[in-house]
Amino acid sequence: MDSGAIRRRLGAGLAVLTASVLLAVAAPGSAQAAPSSCTGRQVRMLPFSTGSVFVYKNGGRVCAVTIQKHPGTKRVVSVGVQARGHVAVRKSRKHTRSSPPVEVYVGHRCVRVSGSVGSGRYTSGWILC
């Protein structure tokens, strides 16, 4: 083999290695942070002791879902969304991973989000104002 062929092979190997490292680093966070039940762009991730509440916005609608920190054990998982001046919408279920999604039309109002997994709870202040 000549030196040009060796350099090309090393360059191709380095490119494959770099791409695989980037995919390995990006995939775990995106897999956990992207519940397929909510549409729109993620605007907040609100962590607490036993899980996280993920908040998505799509136009004038806000969707939220709670994900367990350590999935696998069935626990009561809940989420709630309240637009300022309106009644909160809450959903919960006993599940191994996540709460059912809550989607609410909020327009340009501030939003309060809550979530719980087992005994751990989180309630935000007014956000997305």
Image (tube, helix red, strand yellow):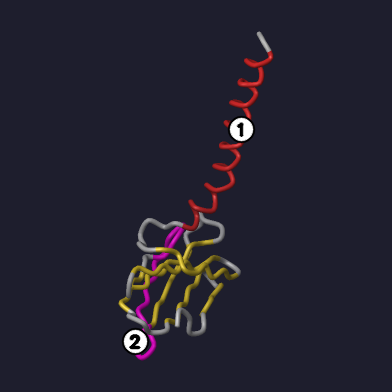
Rendered-image quadrant of the C terminus: bottom left
Residue at 34% of width from left, 87% of height from top? Answer: 87
Q: Tell me, for residue 89, which label it has, or none.
A: none
Question: Which x, y percent locates residue 51?
Answer: 54, 65
Of 101 and 107, which appears nearest the observer? 107
Point out the stretch of residues depicted in magenta. 83-99
Of 11 and 19, which appears nearest the observer? 11
Q: Residue furthest bottom?
A: 85
Residue at 49% of width from left, 72% of height from top? Answer: 116
Vertical placement of residue 66 versus 126, above or below: above
**Sequence-earlier tag: 2 or 1:** 1
Q: CA distance from mark 2 to mark 1?
A: 52 Å
Question: Which x, y percent locates residue 58?
Answer: 35, 68
Question: Which x, y percent locates residue 94?
Answer: 42, 64
Residue at 35% of width from left, 71% of height from top? Answer: 102
Label 1 residue SS? helix
User: Is residue 63 within the magenta segment?
Assistant: no
Q: Given the image, on which type of amino acid does mark 2 rest?
A: Val
CA neighbours of label 2 inside 10 A, class few (<14), some (14 to 19), many (20+): few
CA neighbours of label 1 inside 10 A, class few (<14), some (14 to 19), many (20+): few
Vertical placement of residue 114 versus 5, above or below: below
Question: Which x, y percent locates residue 61?
Answer: 33, 73
Can residue 93 be seen here? yes
Of 19 and 31, which appears nearest the observer? 19
Q: Residue furthest front?
A: 4
Decide: marks 2, 1 in contact (CB < 8 A)?
Answer: no
Locate residue 51 relative to residue 56 in the image: left or right: right
Residue holding disc 2:
87
User: Total number of numbered labels?
Assistant: 2
Q: Quadrant of residue 104?
A: bottom left
Residue holding disc 1:
17
